[in-house]
């Protein structure tokens, strides 16, 4: 399978300032890749390199099997920039129709359909659009020509929760159609429900790439079990993956590291009347794995 995005040793310095260093990354067709990092970590630099808006200091990059410099490749990419400059008196609808023609046409009714889903007001001059509506127009232009690769820089900024849900549904449809999405965010919660993998970039370097399902499996969960009668503590002692065990009468409380299988099998010997398992919070897992220093602005100057 040919990767949709392939970066090898991709590096960008702005003078002595490090934008991105030695990025190795492959994104496969049909994948949703969440690209996470704090402000100034290198997300936008990566995206601009992918789009050939800026050139690498060194390293190689291919997009859809070629370079995004190629007009044929450009036409197959949908891009939402982090900062949208939508100005002027032209109505959003006319602007989107114009863009659609420039890109060789969009399916009939597509712009209106997306506008309805996102609740975008297209009858307003661009300069008068609210921040949220500008973001919606940006999303419509990125999705409307059904591109093979969507590159979305902080897509959910300014959208209210219901619109965010609709946007995530649109992203899932893109995956179902076998197309690919790279979306950046500085908030894990924005991408964790749709991403297959997440990459974490910090101070210009990709520090981790994780499969979201595997990460959840690794997650620490707090579990409480309540039984119809007191249970013997030794029935739960030494179970693999069970930590911080407290057996008090008919209640068992513990933390599970990884699969809950051993605990469930031990509990099954008694009558369980109530079970509480706290859904692992990915934000917490990331902090456990990678510390929290990267939450702050991480600008770095190369020595
Ligand atoms: N045009 C530029 N000139 C000089 N330095 C730049 C330029 N663009 C980015 N940088 C620097 O490169 C680093 C990475 O910036 P980048 O914009 O890629 O981060 P980001 O992860 O997208 O951040 P944000 O979430 O704030 O948009 C930062 O230290 C930034 O100051």
Image (spheres, rainbow, N blue to C red):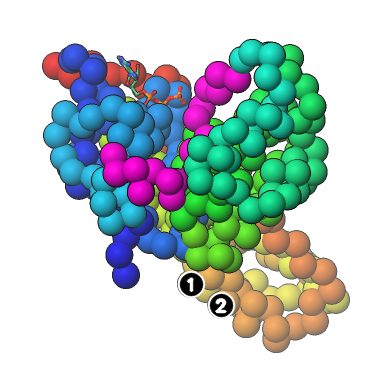
Residue 9 placement (x, y as % from top left): 18, 42
The residue shown at (28%, 27%) is 54
Query: Which of disc 1 and disc 2 is earlier in sequence?
Result: 1
Membership of 269 in magenta stretch: no
Crowd tier of the residue under label 2, counting other residues whose Cα lies within 10 Å: few below 14, some 14–19, many 20 or above: some
The residue shown at (32%, 60%) is 3
Residue 53 placement (x, y as % from top left): 33, 29
Residue 111 placement (x, y as % from top left): 69, 43
Check disc 2 and report its element: helix, strand or loop.
Answer: helix
Left or right: where 119 falls relative to 242 = right
Name the residue that disc number 2 marks: 262
Q: Is residue 64 above or below residue 117?
A: below
Start-end of magenta stretch: 69-86
Left or right: where 74 falls relative to 276 = left
Is the Cβ of the residue at disc 2 closer than 8 Å to that at disc 1? yes
In the image, 7 versus 185, the foreground residue is 7
Q: Which mark is residue 240?
A: 1
In the image, 115 versus 19, the foreground residue is 115
For the C terminus, the image quarter is: top left
* Picture quadrant of residue 252: bottom right
In the image, 239 versus 145, the foreground residue is 145
């Amino acid at each position: 399978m040919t990767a949709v995005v392939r970066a090898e040793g991709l590096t960008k310095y702005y003078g002595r300032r490090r934008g991105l260093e030695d990025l190795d990354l492959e994104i496969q067709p049909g994948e949703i890749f969440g690209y996470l990092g704090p402000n100034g970590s290198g997300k936008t630099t990566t995206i601009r390199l992918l789009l050939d808006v800026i050139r690498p200091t060194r390293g190689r990059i291919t997009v859809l099997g070629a370079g995004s410099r190629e007009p044929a490749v450009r036409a197959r990419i949908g891009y939402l920039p982090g900062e949208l400059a939508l100005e002027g008196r032209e109505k959003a609808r006319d602007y989107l129709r114009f863009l659609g023609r420039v890109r060789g046409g969009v399916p009939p009714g597509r712009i209106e359909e997306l506008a309805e889903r996102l609740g975008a007001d297209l009858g307003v001059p661009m300069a008068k659009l609210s921040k949220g509506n500008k973001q919606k127009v940006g999303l419509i232009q990125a999705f409307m020509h059904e591109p093979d690769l969507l590159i979305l820089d902080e897509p959910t900024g300014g959208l209210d929760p219901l619109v965010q849900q609709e946007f995530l549904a649109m992203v899932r449809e893109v995956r179902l159609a076998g197309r690919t999405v790279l979306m950046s965010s500085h908030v894990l919660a924005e991408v964790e429900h749709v991403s297959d993998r997440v990459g974490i970039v910090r101070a210009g370097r990709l520090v981790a790439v994780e499969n979201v399902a595997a990460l959840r499996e690794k997650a620490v969960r707090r579990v409480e079990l309540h039984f119809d009668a007191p249970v013997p503590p030794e029935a739960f002692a030494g179970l693999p993956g069970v930590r911080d065990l407290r057996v008090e009468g008919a209640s068992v409380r513990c933390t599970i590291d990884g699969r809950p299988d051993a605990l469930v099998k031990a509990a099954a010997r008694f009558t369980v009347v109530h079970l509480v398992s706290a859904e692992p919070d990915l934000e917490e897992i990331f902090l456990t794995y990678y510390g929290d220093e990267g939450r702050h602005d991480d600008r770095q100057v190369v020595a």
